[in-house]
Amino acid sequence: MNISKDNYQILFEEKKRKFSETFKDRLSENYFQSPYKGYRHRAEFSLMKVDTKICYAMTKEGKKEVVDSFPITSQKIQDLMNPVLECIREYSEISEKLFQIEFQSSRSEDAMLTLIYHKELKDDWIKIASDLSSMLAISVIGRSKNQKIIIGNEFVTETYRYLDREFSLKLYEQCFSQTNPYICDAMLQWVIENIDSSEGDIMELHCGLGTFTIPLSTVFQNVLATENSRPSIKALKENIYLNKRTNIYNARLSGKETLEAYNGVRKFRRLSDVDLDQLKIDSVFLDPPREGLDQFTIENLTQMKNIIYISCGFESFKRDLSILQKTHDIVNLAMFDQFPYTEHIESGVILKKITKD
């Protein structure tokens, strides 16, 4: 991988061209660039031996390759890679049956190391891992089947900034979080600058641990935020408390279940504390998995005044948008370079309900 300003710009312009050609008849396109290096605050490696020496590895085109350095990651992770590898090489208690290593950092230099095993972790592992944690001033987590040992915290704290505001989130080890905080800042600012909050409430599907939930709660009267992952909804509750937000209602529900509940099709005990009839929801925020929206979800969005859709799958985004445009007009489009040096395109669109004159 050629990590350089010039190469980054060439690849970014190619993504920009593809996005622009796809939506060439649309106005208000926005393009957000990433730093060309040091932008990724999460990294995962496997291990391989080269001449009996343990090395970091990643799989490329089905083949493991040695990783000596990884400049797309944060400087904090880069600084940790060598001392962690030296510990793995020196202590069999750490290296034995270790098959995956995960680093996570924040821009405040907070960092967490997760070591994943095919064995039970015992006292000798805890002692060496504790020493490693103290020496590097990081949290260390050991995971194996039915076992999780936490030395320090199981999260890093990241501070996001948009407009003249900032807020902090606890990013938990087993929860999805944005790997590129610089692009996350850009997404937050674009959303908040361009939405029509009016006097209504907003529904957020696939809310995760609250990356968009917290900012949305500052511009809407109320937010109904749902997520199907138990760890993520637990983290969301902590982040709501951390940011002292009192207008966010949350529940562990899938997107389909949320829409069924809101439309009165089904009742859920998990929503027993939420009076849906009192909420004046006229907007929805969506950040679904790569496969995009299912037909049920799309059909149940047609009456929403505003739709804000962030997508990590370009093909599914185009497909969904072609359907949503039957009932809504595009107000704003954006492309976010979440993953430089890849073909991945992160997209955003804000749509408004078509009104009949």
Image: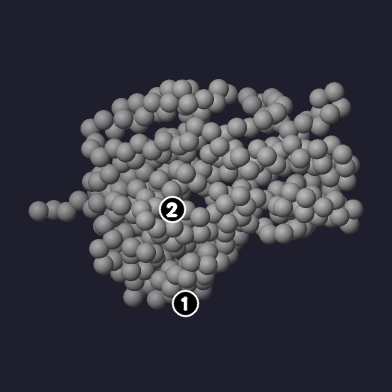
Is any part of residue 18 visible from this angle?
A: no
Name the foreground residue: 162 vs 115.
Answer: 162
Left of 320 or right of it: where is 108? right
* Quadrant of res 23: top left
Under mark 2, the amino acid is Arg
Q: Is residue 35 above or below residue 250?
A: above
* Quadrant of res 63: top right
Disc 1, SS:
loop
Name of the residue lying farthest toward the left: 357
* Quadrant of res 30: top left
Residue 236: % across, % down: 53, 63
Disc 2, SS:
strand
Under mark 1, the amino acid is Asp
Of the 4 image quadrants, the one containing the N terminus is top right
Residue 177: % across, % down: 54, 50
Residue 186: % across, % down: 40, 45
Q: Residues within 10 Å of mark 2 (few under 14, many from 20)?
A: some
Q: Residues within 10 Å of mark 1 (few under 14, many from 20)?
A: few
Cα–Cα gap, marks 1 and 2: 32 Å
Q: Is residue 246 above or below residue 118?
A: below
Is any part of residue 135 visible from this angle?
A: yes
Name the foreground residue: 280 vs 96.
Answer: 96
| Residue with the mark numbered 2 | 161
Per the rendering, the mark at residue 227 is none
The answer to which of marks 1 and 2 sits earlier in the sequence is: 2
Q: Is residue 5 above or below residue 119?
A: above
Residue 252: % across, % down: 52, 64
| Residue with the mark numbered 1 | 273
Q: Residue at x 25, y 63 (%)?
A: 198
